[in-house]
Amino acid sequence: MQETLNKHKHNWADKDYASSAIGGLFFLLISLVFNYFTNNYAASRQSNFVNDIILDNIPTLNVEIIVIYGALFLILFIAVLIILEPKRLPFVVKSVALFIVIRAVFMTLTHIAPSPDSITLGDGKLLNLLGLNGTGDLFFSGHTGFPFLLALTFWDNKRLRLPFVFISIVLAASVLLGHLHYSIDVFAAYFITYTIFCLARRFFSKDFKYLN
């Protein structure tokens, strides 16, 4: 515990780190606000649902616990990783914020309604804020892309890479089994997320160097 506190004192005493970390947290806050409004916008302009070769051939399962608590566990897990190693904070929060902003923009472009067989997730402003309401936030799948982004971020650390890849696969399967996302939402998430990671690594190259 003392070692962790010393790391925080050392990092926050560095003006460059402090300004980068505060800027990253502010960027994350703005991205969440932006996501909230774009999510509501997309949900209010749904058109019709479409057929899907995978969803049309698999039953609907109640995966609400996995989808909601899996996402919340992931957020808690990354928070713990940042607390243990504060030098990770600037790049992680900036890349996550970039992910949220780009995904929010994608949500506003096409307004397809969810599958009629999709399960209903718990309602509430928190779920809406996190993009977990399963209504307007279809393309692309945040449940799939977010843990994959973290896997790419910590790719050189096998002990972190493998769990994040595993979580991404589990959540991807869950949103399909719950008919919460179309298959294109899930499969496209991996390609788009990789591009987002490449952009983050270029935009925030100085922060990326201090990850591991």
Image (cartoon, rainbow, N blue to C red):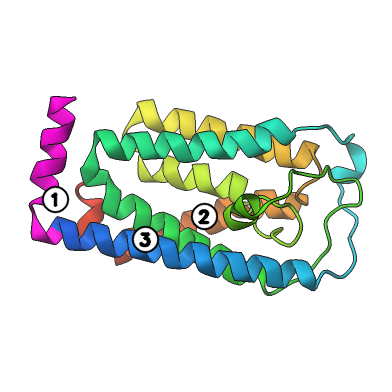
Does residue 4 appear anywhere in the picture? yes
Q: Which mark is residue 12?
A: 1
Looking at the picture, which amino acid does disc 1 mark?
Trp
> How far separated are the C-alphas under marks 1 and 3?
22 Å
Residue shown at the point (8%, 51%) measured from the top left: 13
Examine the residues drawn in magenta and state their main secondary structure. helix
Quadrant (top left/top right/bottom left/bottom right) for the C terminus: top left
Asked if the residue at tag 1 contacts the one at tag 2, i.e. Cβ–Cβ closer than 8 Å, the answer is no
> How far separated are the C-alphas under marks 3 and 2?
10 Å
> How far separated are the C-alphas under marks 2 and 1?
30 Å
Q: Which residues are magenta?
A: 1-16
Q: Which residue is mark 3?
A: 200
> How busy is the neighbourhood of tag 1: few (under 14 within 10 Å), some, or many (20 plus)?
some
Looking at the picture, which amino acid does disc 2 mark?
Thr
- Expressed as whole percent of the image width and height from the top left, the position of residue 99 reads 48, 59
Asked if the residue at tag 2 contacts the one at tag 3, i.e. Cβ–Cβ closer than 8 Å, the answer is no
Residue shown at the point (61%, 70%) measured from the top left: 37
Mark 1 vs mark 3: give the one in front.
1
